Image: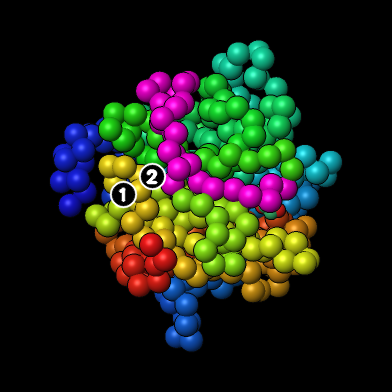
C-alpha cells in the first residue's frame, strides 16, 4: 500500500535502510488490566536524571534504529541548567550510554555556529541523511537543523526559521518534491499560545509556503498550545502525528499527548485529531520532577510488519520514558475519538 501511495505522489523513497535489517523495537505486550490505548514500559523511566555527571535531567529526546542497534540525540540539561545535545548509543533501545560531552556540529556560517542552548531534538531519516531538528538558541528560540550520515560527524545547516519558533519536526520524505516541516511559532518565554504550522523548502535553506495545520483550543487539555512530537509516520490513513497538548491551570501548565492523522499529499489538512489525550501525566515520575506534570513525546519507533509502536517521551522535564501501542488500534482510536 505504501508503494502505491508513493507512486500517486510521484515520490520515490531512496532510503537504503529497510526495517528488515534493523533490530526489533523495544516492546512489552499490553498488560491485562490496561484500559487505555497506550501503556507504559514497566521499568520507566529508562533514563534517570543523572546518567552522566554533568546532567541535571535527560528528557524530550530523539531515538532511532541505526545499523544493528540504536542511536539517540538526547536533551541533557547541564548543572548550569542550560540544555545541550548529547549523542547516545544502545543495543536494545532501553539501556543507553550517553556521551559525556555535547555533540560537535561543523560547517555552519560563523554567525549561526554558536548555539546559546539546544533542546527538544527530533531525528528524521530522509534519503541518505539523518536530520536533527531542535530548538536552537539564536537570539531566542528557533529551529536548528543539522545532518549526519554516520552519527560521527554532524553538519550544521541554516536555522530554518526566524525566532521565535519551537517544535520543528521534519517529514521523512519530500512531499510534492519539497522537504517539509511542522513547526510552532512562539514567543521568547513559556509561550501561552501556540498552533502547529507546515512549511516547505526546496533546498533546506529557504523555507516558505507556510500553512496552518491545527490550533490549540477545543478541549481544555489542549486549550493553551500544541506542538508536534515525533517524526510523522506514513500510513495508508494519512500521516500519523503525535503531538503535545497543554492545559492551563492555576498551578501552571499540564502537558499531555494527543495524536492526529494528516493528509498524505497536503499535510496541512487534518483528517482526524483526538478529542482526549492518549497519555496524560499520572505516575510519580510524570507528575513530579524539575517541571511537574509534563509528558513530552519526541520519538516513535515503528515496526511496519507488526504495527508495534514504541514512543519515547520526556517526563516532568527530568527523565526519559517509553510507552507502547499498536498502529491499527491507535488509528481506529483516533478515528473514533476525533473532534474533526
Ligand atoms: C516547553 C519546552 C519543553 C518542556 C516544556 C515543559 O516550552 O521548553 O522542553 O518540556 O516546556 O516545561
Residue 13 at x, y percent in the picture: 26, 36
Q: Is residue 58 visible?
A: no
Residue 292 at x, y percent in the picture: 74, 63
Q: Quarter of the image holding residue 137?
A: top right
Label 2: which secondary element:
loop
Q: Is residue 222 visible?
A: yes
103 and 255: which one is in front? 255
Question: Is the C-beta separation of discs 2 and 1 under 8 Å?
Answer: yes
The residue located at (52%, 35%) in the rendering is: 132
Q: Where does the C terminus fall, quadrant-wise?
A: bottom left
4 and 273: which one is in front? 273
The residue located at (50%, 46%) in the rendering is: 196
The residue located at (33%, 33%) in the rendering is: 174
The residue located at (19%, 34%) in the rendering is: 10
Question: Where does label 1 land, which residue?
Answer: 263
295 sits to left or right of 9? right
Residues drawn in magenta: 190-213
Question: Where does label 2 land, which residue?
Answer: 268
Residue 210 lies in the magenta-colored region: yes
Residue 103 at x, y percent in the picture: 63, 32
- Alpha carbon of mark 2 to alpha carbon of mark 1: how far? 7 Å
289 sits to left or right of 182? right
Amino acid at each position: 500500500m505504501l508503494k502505491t501511495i508513493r507512486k500517486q505522489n510521484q515520490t520515490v523513497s531512496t532510503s537504503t535502510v529497510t526495517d528488515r535489517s534493523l533490530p526489533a523495537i523495544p516492546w512489552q505486550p499490553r498488560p491485562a488490566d490496561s484500559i487505555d490505548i497506550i501503556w507504559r514500559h514497566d521499568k520507566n523511566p529508562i533514563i534517570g536524571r543523572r546518567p552522566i555527571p554533568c546532567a541535571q535531567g535527560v528528557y524530550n529526546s530523539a531515538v532511532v534504529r541505526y545499523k544493528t542497534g540504536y542511536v539517540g540525540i538526547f536533551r541533557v540539561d547541564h548543572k548550569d541548567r542550560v540544555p545541550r545535545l548529547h549523542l547516545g548509543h544502545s543495543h536494545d533501545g532501553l539501556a543507553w550510554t550517553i556521551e559525556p560531552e555535547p555533540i560537535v556540529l561543523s560547517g555552519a556560517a560563523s554567525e549561526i555556529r554558536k548555539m546559546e542552548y539546544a533542546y527538544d531534538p527530533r531525528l528524521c531519516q530522509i534519503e541518505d541523511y539523518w536530520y536533527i531538528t531542535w530548538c536552537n538558541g539564536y537570539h531566542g528560540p528557533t529551529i536548528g537543523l543539522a545532518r549526519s550520515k554516520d552519527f560521527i560527524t554532524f553538519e550544521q545547516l541554516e536555522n530554518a526559521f526566524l525566532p521565535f519558533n519551537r517544535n520543528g519536526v521534519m517529514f521523512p520524505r519530500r512531499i510534492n518534491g519539497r522537504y517539509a516541516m511542522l513547526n510552532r511559532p512562539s514567543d521568547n518565554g513559556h509561550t501561552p499560545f501556540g498552533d502547529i504550522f507546515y512549511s516547505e523548502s526546496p533546498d533546506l535553506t529557504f523555507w516558505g509556503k507556510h500553512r496552518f495545520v491545527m490550533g490549540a483550543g477545543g478541549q481544555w487539555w489542549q486549550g493553551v498550545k500544541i506542538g508536534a512530537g515525533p517524526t510523522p509516520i506514513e500510513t495508508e490513513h494519512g500521516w500519523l502525528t503525535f503531538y503535545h497538548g497543554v492545559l492551563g491551570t492555576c498551578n501552571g501548565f499540564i502537558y499531555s499527548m494527543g495524536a492526529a492523522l494528516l493528509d498524505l499529499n497536503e499535510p496541512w489538512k487534518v483528517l482526524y485529531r483526538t478529542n482526549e489525550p492518549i497519555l496524560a501525566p499520572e505516575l510519580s515520575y510524570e507528575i513530579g520532577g524539575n517541571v511537574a506534570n509534563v509528558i513530552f513525546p519526541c520519538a516513535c519507533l515503528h515496526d511496519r510488519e507488526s504495527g508495534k509502536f514504541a514512543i519515547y517521551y520526556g517526563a516532568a522535564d527530568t527523565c526519559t520514558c517509553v510507552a507502547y501501542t499498536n498502529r491499527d488500534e491507535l488509528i481506529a482510536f483516533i478515528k473514533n475519538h476525533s473532534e474533526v
